[in-house]
Image (tube, rainbow, N blue to C red):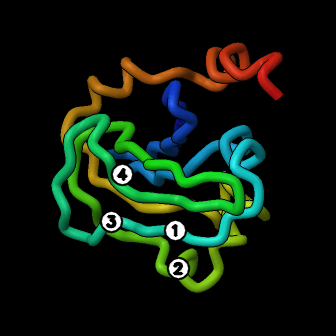
Amino acid sequence: MSEIYFTEDHEWILVEGDIGTCGISEFAQEQLGDIVYVELPEPGRLVAQNDEMAVVESVKAASEIYAPVSGEVIESNEELVDDPARINADAMGEGWFFKIRISDTKELDDLLDKAAYDALTAGQH
């Protein structure tokens, strides 16, 4: 079974077992506008929750992407390097940034579920 969580900084993590697929939310993508560049973490990198993991740049701004949980990066979505517009087209699907092997699933308790995230972003559009 998979579950999705969000951070207050607009990252998402789809959890399947001890693997999390991470990216930015549709809301964040809308706020950024057309994404023109992405810098991804290297597989094998160990990170702590809230560490800076990646950078995304749009025509409007650059933003850091933070690790929703601690763990080891096991894969980066290299297709985004050549085609960062995938994030605009499908931020929570093909626009995923990296996959992480979660080292402490208790950290998921610090994140928001979809209803709480929707409440956070309501009225901010």
Local secondary structure at mark 3: loop
Q: Nearer the viewer, mark 3 or mark 1?
A: 1
Residue position marked by numbered label 3 in the rendering: 41
**How many numbered markers are drawn?**
4
Asked where in the image residue 36 lies, by quadrant, the reply is bottom right
Question: What is the crowding at mark 2: few (fewer than 14 residues within 10 Å), some, or many (at least 20)?
Answer: some
Local secondary structure at mark 2: helix
Residue at 63 percent across and 15 percent down: it is 116
Labels 1 & 2 near each other (Cβ < 8 A): yes
Compare marks 2 and 4 and give the one earlier in the sequence: 4
Q: Is residue 61 above or below residue 34?
A: above
Residue type, numbered disc 4: Ile
For residue 91, side relative to residue 80 (left or right): right
Compare marks 2 and 3 and give the one earlier in the sequence: 3
Question: What is the crowding at mark 1: few (fewer than 14 residues within 10 Å), some, or many (at least 20)?
Answer: many
Residue position marked by numbered label 1 in the rendering: 38
Which quarter of the image is occupied by the C terminus? top right
Labels 4 & 3 near each other (Cβ < 8 A): no
Residue position marked by numbered label 4 in the rendering: 19
Report the disc number at residue 81: 2
Residue type, numbered disc 1: Val
Residue 91 x/y as whole percent: 68, 55
Q: What distance separates the C-alpha of mark 1 from that of mark 2? A: 6 Å
Residue 15 x/y as whole percent: 45, 43
Residue type, numbered disc 3: Pro
